Amino acid sequence: MRIGILQYRPRYLDREGNLDTVEGLLKSAPALDLLVLPELFASGYFFRRREDLERVAEPIPEGPTTEAVLRWARQLNAVIVAGLPERTGEHFYNSALIASPTGVVDVYRKAHLFYEEKRYFSPGPGPLRVYDLGRFRLGVMICYDWRFPECARTLALKGAEVIAHPSNLVRPEAQEAIRIRALENRLFIATANRWGEESNGKEVLRFTGHSQVVDPNGERILFTEPQATGLFCVDIDPALAREKRITAWNDLFLDRRPDLYEL
């Protein structure tokens, strides 16, 4: 199967302009099975005030970002995982839309909120789900979820072969830690990160780029430059993630000792 990662520099609160930019980057896309877009890819990230979030947050599936992602999924005949700010009643979620050519598969709401996200977003209620999409089984994390090994491990135990990871990474150790998450669970992780910087009026966040796809051995099979813009693709074999045996005597999951892990 072929994974596509889109990396670019979104403009703050310019949803229509960002959607047009992504549409242009996808015009010459090759055949794909899975496309991963960054976290909050069309809205910007570092909100200065609640009113800014209210301006770009939208319901799913009625909002313009969802409409665009569904159109791209049909055009590419691919599954797309894309981050957007979701409004549900009085609540806002940092969400990832999972879209297929036939419609919305599901919405994952970020479980672990980072920094000032806690001022505006509610944490996702879960559960962590795995989606059987025919050629592969997909799990989803968003950005700071990488910091919690329980998140990737739960998805792996539920059968995920690929984890899509829309991100706005700012911490320099994140990409290395993601390699460990792939290695310790023997699966693929596809991180779509943005680049550029944003200010909330008091401080500046600088996004690190370096989107990547990591294989079950923790090796990078795709790794972008920090300020690269474009669609980057790599072919993988999801069957490699089904093999949890690491020696003739050791199986990563059968060797687990849950009886020892209780607090």
Image: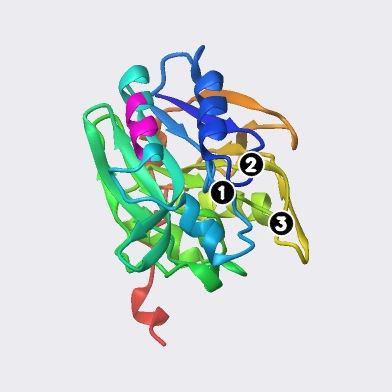
Q: CA distance from mark 2 to mark 1?
A: 7 Å
> In the rendered structure, are the residues bearing label 3 and label 1 in contact, judged by CB atoms less than 8 Å apart?
no
Q: Is residue 216 visible?
A: yes
Tell me what residue is drawn at x 57 percent, y 64 percent.
147
Residue 213 x %, y %: 56, 36
Task: State which mark lies toward you, 3 or 1.
Answer: 1
Mark closest to the chain's N terminus, 2 or 1? 1
> In the rendered structure, are the residues bearing label 2 and label 1 in contact, judged by CB atoms less than 8 Å apart?
yes
Indicate the colouring scheme.
rainbow
Q: Amino acid at mark 1?
A: Ser
Comparing 215 with 28, the one in front is 28
Tell me what residue is drawn at x 30 percent, y 22 percent.
74
Quarter of the picture containing the N terminus is top left
**Was residue 166 drawn as part of the magenta stretch in this picture?**
no
Q: In the drawing, does residue 227 fall left or right of residue 98?
A: right
Mark 1 secondary-structure assignment: loop
Residue 135 x %, y %: 28, 29
- Magenta residues span 66-71
Tell me what residue is drawn at x 41 percent, y 49 percent.
96
The single residue placed furthest to the right in the displayed view is: 203
Query: Is most of the magenta stretch helix, strand or loop?
Result: helix
Q: In the drawing, does residue 226 fall left or right of residue 32?
A: right
Mark closest to the chain's N terminus, 3 or 1? 1
Provide the residue designation for mark 3: 173
Provide the residue designation for mark 1: 167
**Label 1: how many residues lie within 10 Å, few (<14), some (14-19) or many (20+)?**
many
Q: Quadrant of residue 134?
A: top left
Q: Which mark is residue 194?
A: 2
Mark 2 secondary-structure assignment: loop
Residue 128 x %, y %: 33, 60
Comparing 76 with 178, the one in front is 76
